[in-house]
Image (cartoon, rainbow, N blue to C red):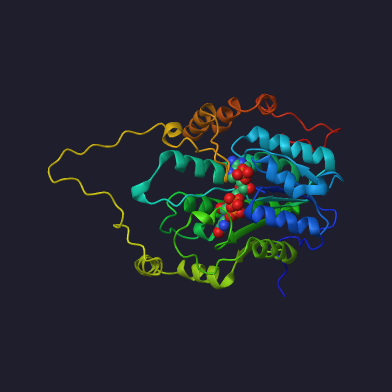
Amino acid sequence: MLSSLNPRVRDWRGRRVWIVGASSGIGAAVARELFSRGARVALSARREEPLRELAGPAAQIGSALILPMDVTRPGSVRDALQTIVDRWQGIDVVLWVAGTYRPMRAYDFDLADAHRIVQTNLGGVVNGLASIMPVLIGQRSGAIGIVSSVAGFNGLPMSLVYGPTKAALINLAQSLYFDLHPLGIGVHLINPGFVETPLTELNEFPMPAIVSAQTAANRILTGFARGEFETHFPRRFTGTMKLLQLLPYRLYFAVVKRITDSEAARGAPPAFAPGAPIRVPEIARPANASPGATAPSGSAAGDSAAEAVATAKAAAEPAAGADAEAAAPPAAAKSANSRSGPRRPRSRKKPAAVP
Ligand SMILES: NC(=O)c1ccc[n+]([C@@H]2O[C@H](COP(=O)([O-])OP(=O)(O)OC[C@H]3O[C@@H](n4cnc5c(N)ncnc54)[C@H](OP(=O)(O)O)[C@@H]3O)[C@@H](O)[C@H]2O)c1
């Protein structure tokens, strides 16, 4: 029999797990399941209240940590991880679930939403890795699981920006495996099909083979128990999506168009009048274009205009981290400053210090 691609994680009792994106949906369901299996779970997302509810009495006895943070701010991610390793003297599993979605097509493209999706789904993971990788590598143990999506397999209608971020995560997890596996560190790629969560409430189209968040949580933990590199579910749907990847484009486009009944011309704006001058639309400032661009999911209140501007700035410039930190609260800003100098050797007293 072939050996598993990752060290197997079967017994969760006492394991130190960090779930990023735990305030609802898949992340919350995994957290509930892990509490019931005896793990210690650190819970992160932007909204603190749902994290508190989820932790319940586990927070009092120290088996839950509530660490609100925003993945688009590398300093807040770093500070959360430092708290975990200080409290628990290390970490066993990081499960990165945080993500955001909005169906988008070529003719309803919104720059602010596009930046928000890229910054959260891909930028967030990159921000996380900057802190997580040195800790796992220093420990020579542990595992990271990254939740991507079947939307990352191939281009799909409605997935104009979301899909590419998920495709990037698949590629990223594959690259990560080459570096971390030889050091004894697990890398798990999780590609769900449709799961019933607040995120899919936005979809107005039929979602084939949709499963509950609890089913998703069980399947993810089975993937860890088997030491799988890729965990995809439900197989009756994800298997088909994998087969579609093998088709030549001519067939792929025809089949997906048929399955999704996706007619791009429907809903498109009228064509230019013949002979009329063509005007390229002005680029709206992302912050103004979508005031709720950085609002927590499920929250009616948007972030402040200043934060939205900072997010938009961060999205537009390569040095995104530095700009995002500029708008971060003092604690996060402080940690960013302390990272700006040349890399120092890790202190012996704090082996699990997060750079
Ligand atoms: N549902 C599906 O059908 C499906 C399918 C494939 C893949 N996925 C992926 O599964 C993951 C979880 O999605 P879900 O369906 O469970 O949706 P969900 O209920 O909306 O969960 C998203 C989680 O991400 C957190 N989050 C979003 N932006 C964040 C930020 N800037 N900083 C920190 N946390 C942030 C949210 O918390 P706050 O709002 O409190 O910050 C929430 O906890 C996503 O990556 C999604 O792309 C979902």
Q: Taking 239 as reference, is 300 above or below it?
A: above
Observer-nearest of 196 and 160: 196
Quadrant showing the N terminus:
bottom right
Q: Position of residue 234 (x, y in %)?
A: 59, 69
Side of 61 where 53 appears, left or right: left
Direction front: furthest residue: 300
Reply above or below: 104 against 82: below
Determine whether, in the image, residue 37 is placed left or right of residue 223: right
Instruction: For the C terminus, give its image quadrant.
Output: top right
Residue 126 visible (yes or no): no
* Number of marks in the rendered image: 0
The residue drawn where x is 50% and y is 60% is 153
Please tell me in which quadrant of the rendered image residue 323 appears. Answer: top right
Q: Residue furthest bottom?
A: 1
Residue 48 location, x and y as percent?
69, 40
Quadrant of the image occupied by residue 225: bottom right
Instruction: Decide which of 150, 189 is in the foreground and name it.
Output: 150
Q: Is residue 167 visible?
A: yes
Horizontally, residue 97 falls left or right of residue 252, namely right
What is the x, y in percent for residue 162?
48, 50
Q: Is residue 235 above or below residue 336?
A: below
Residue 145 horizontal/vertical position (percent): 67, 54
